[in-house]
Image: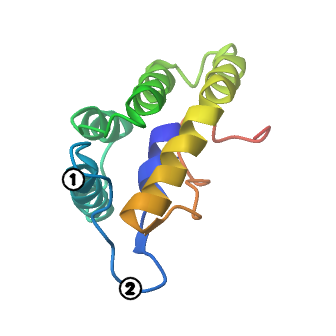
Amino acid sequence: MLAIALVGGACSDSDDGVGRAGGTEGDSGGDFCADFQALNDELAASEASDEAIVEGLDDLDPPRQIADDFDTVVAAARQLVALDPSDPDAMPQAQATQQAAAEAQQNVSSYIEEECGLDMSTSGTDDAGPDASNGR
């Protein structure tokens, strides 16, 4: 799932071992980085549901340079969470939703890596949900 991949991938600081609260003045980047890291830490310490992850992401205030992409990722994650994994149409819907949000996901991940200093290379490949089965 997009949201899990986004949060699940941000589990370590950059190579220097220190996450930096990046962003430029006036864009809330530093606050976003700190808030994203706090959410990541909180979720890593618990077995949060997909819904809780989406709600946590929805509560973040992304900087303006990724706000639209971030909203796209959260909206896609919300759609994925709402899918019924027992529905045979869920897999194509999940794949279409992920595909539609792929560029936004990449932009948000790049921002988090570059401005927040977090390693987003680990993806959430063990995620539960309709998109976690074969065909990924």
Q: CA distance from mark 1 to mark 2?
A: 18 Å
Relative to 2, is 63 on the left or the right?
left
Q: x, y percentage for residue 114?
A: 48, 61
Q: x, y percentage for residue 9?
A: 49, 59
Q: x, y percentage for residue 96?
A: 69, 20
Residue at image mark 2: 17
Relative to 4, is 18 on the left or the right?
left
Q: How packed is label 2: few (under 14 Cα within 10 Å), some, or many (20 or more)?
A: few
Closer to us: 49 or 66:
66
Identified at 28% across, 50% down, the residue is 29
Residue at image mark 1: 35
Name the secondary structure under disc 1: helix
Mark number, residue 1? none
Quadrant into which the C terminus falls: top right
Identified at 31% across, 40% down, the residue is 63
Q: Which residue in the rendered view is the most extreme toward the front?
A: 25
Identified at 61% across, 22% down, the residue is 97
Identified at 59% across, 44% down, the residue is 106
Q: Which residue in the rendered view is the most extreme toward the bottom?
A: 16
Count of labels in the image: 2
Q: How packed is label 1: few (under 14 Cα within 10 Å), some, or many (20 or more)?
A: some
Name the secondary structure under disc 2: loop
Label 1 with label 2: CB-CB less than 8 Å: no
In the depicted structure, whether residue 18 falls above or below residue 52: below
- Of label 1 and label 2, which has the lower sequence position? 2
Quadrant into which the N terminus falls: top right
Closer to us: 116 or 91:
116
Q: Amino acid at mark 1?
A: Asp
Which of the 4 image quadrants contains residue 103?
Answer: top right
Which of the 4 image quadrants contains residue 101?
Answer: top right
